[in-house]
Image: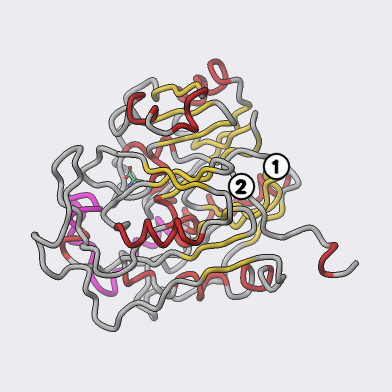
Amino acid sequence: MTANSKPLAVRSWDEWSPLKSIIVGTAANSCFPFEHERMISSTTTAAHAAQFKKDNPFPQYILKAADKELDKFAKVLRDRGIEVFRPNTVDWRAVGGYTGSMVRDGLLVVGSTIIESAYSWRSREKEVDLMLKDTLFKLAEDPRITIVRAPKPPARETLYDGYPEANKVNPLNGVRWAINNSRIAFDAADFMRFGNVVVGQYSHVTNDKGIDYVRSHLPKGVLLELLDVDDPHCMHLDAVLLPLRKGLLIYNPDRTNKEALSNIKLFDNWDCKPFPFVPKARSDPPSYMTSNWLVLNLLVLDPHTIMVDEYDPEFAEFLRKECGMEVIGIPFRHVNCLGGSLHCATLDLVRDS
Ligand code: NVA
């Protein structure tokens, strides 16, 4: 078989087509990210802010349990015939980094184009290189796959200069963004794929230059639409929207609504359902940096199958009964402590569409 007749190892256009290949993160050695005080207060849980300091690993019991959960998750996927890649193990403390568990944040895969995040969080700037040099970068040696590497970050961070005048506010709630627009900044998880439309949001980590940059690197014919999101701690769109299949979406009614969704033409003929309950509070193990809305941060395996955190049986029942999904529950409570759930902890590389 010649290189060009091999199926592409990266081709994924949406969040729901049948999953064939994926990266599942690893938790070992994760440390609390050390960032500017304004960023920490904007994006993490106030009760835990003091933990976000230099050289502070997450508690070992959490990391061990999280890796068990991630290994089990990977096994369930493999048992269903899905190819699973795992990142390299990295000593995050030694490199002043954060985690290998939240692989979604660093790379936006649209078709066979991979756009690397220009992270606001400087603790993350080497993450993709360190985690994925032996997996993703090997797959992407195929000339048909485009990797857009992040622009080199400045030696001196400028994102916090000139506050407050230099920073815009979120018009929906008057909350001032943590960063200015002095350089390109975005997290891939502020964007979600819907075929030839990508939906994105501004957040405390994604600015105008970041949005323009993503738009300019999307494959030809893919349109970027922006959703207004009302969240004082806004960071990552995958606790706001959960597309289940083409035409069916669950949304977070605390952060958006039918009117905002209707500004995006794509959703004209979609059934957009609000999350039907109050999400359960999560305190043990601690939620250091995320809200109860991780309940929406799930992995769709195909248009009729979804993996969920087994902690949320009520929502699982809703997905079965009201949305016609087969639901596979797995434990994920300890991965949640590190900043996300099943969607954040994965990066799908191939979906058949
Ligand atoms: N920042 C979001 C999590 C996104 C996965 C939240 O805490 O709701």
Instruction: Indicate the quadrant containing the N terminus: top left, top right, bottom left or bottom right.
Output: bottom right
Q: Nearest the camera: 22 or 197?
A: 197
Residue located 38% across and 69% down the image: 124
Q: Residue furthest top?
A: 321
Report helix, strand or loop for mark 2.
loop
Percent coordinates x, y for residue 218 in the rendering: 52, 57
Disc sitting over residue 39 in the figure: none
Say above or below: 190 vs 277: below
Label 2 Cα crowd, 10 Å radius (few <14 / some 14-19 / many 20+): many
Say above or below: 67 vs 144: above
Percent coordinates x, y for residue 53 in the rendering: 22, 69
The tag earlier along the polypeptide, 1 or 2, is 2
Label 1 close to label 2 by CB (< 8 Å) = yes
Percent coordinates x, y for residue 8 in the rendering: 74, 59
Q: Is residue 2 left or right of residue 309?
A: right
Disc sitting over residue 353 in the figure: 1
Q: Nearest the camera: 297 or 191?
A: 191
User: Is residue 220 shown in magenta?
Assistant: no
Magenta stretch?
41-63
Q: Nearest the camera: 82 or 222?
A: 222
Percent coordinates x, y for residue 330 in the rendering: 55, 39
Q: Image quadrant of residue 164?
A: bottom left
Report helix, strand or loop for mark 1.
loop
Label 1 Cα crowd, 10 Å radius (few <14 / some 14-19 / many 20+): few
Q: Amino acid at mark 1?
A: Ser
Say above or below: 281 vs 82: above
User: Is residue 54 shown in magenta?
Assistant: yes
Residue located 39% across and 44% down the image: 237
Say above or below: 209 vs 137: above
Q: From the image, tell me which residue sits under label 2.
A: 13
Instruction: Indicate the quadrant containing the C terminus: top left, top right, bottom left or bottom right.
Output: top right
Ligand 1 is located in which of the four quadrants?
A: top left
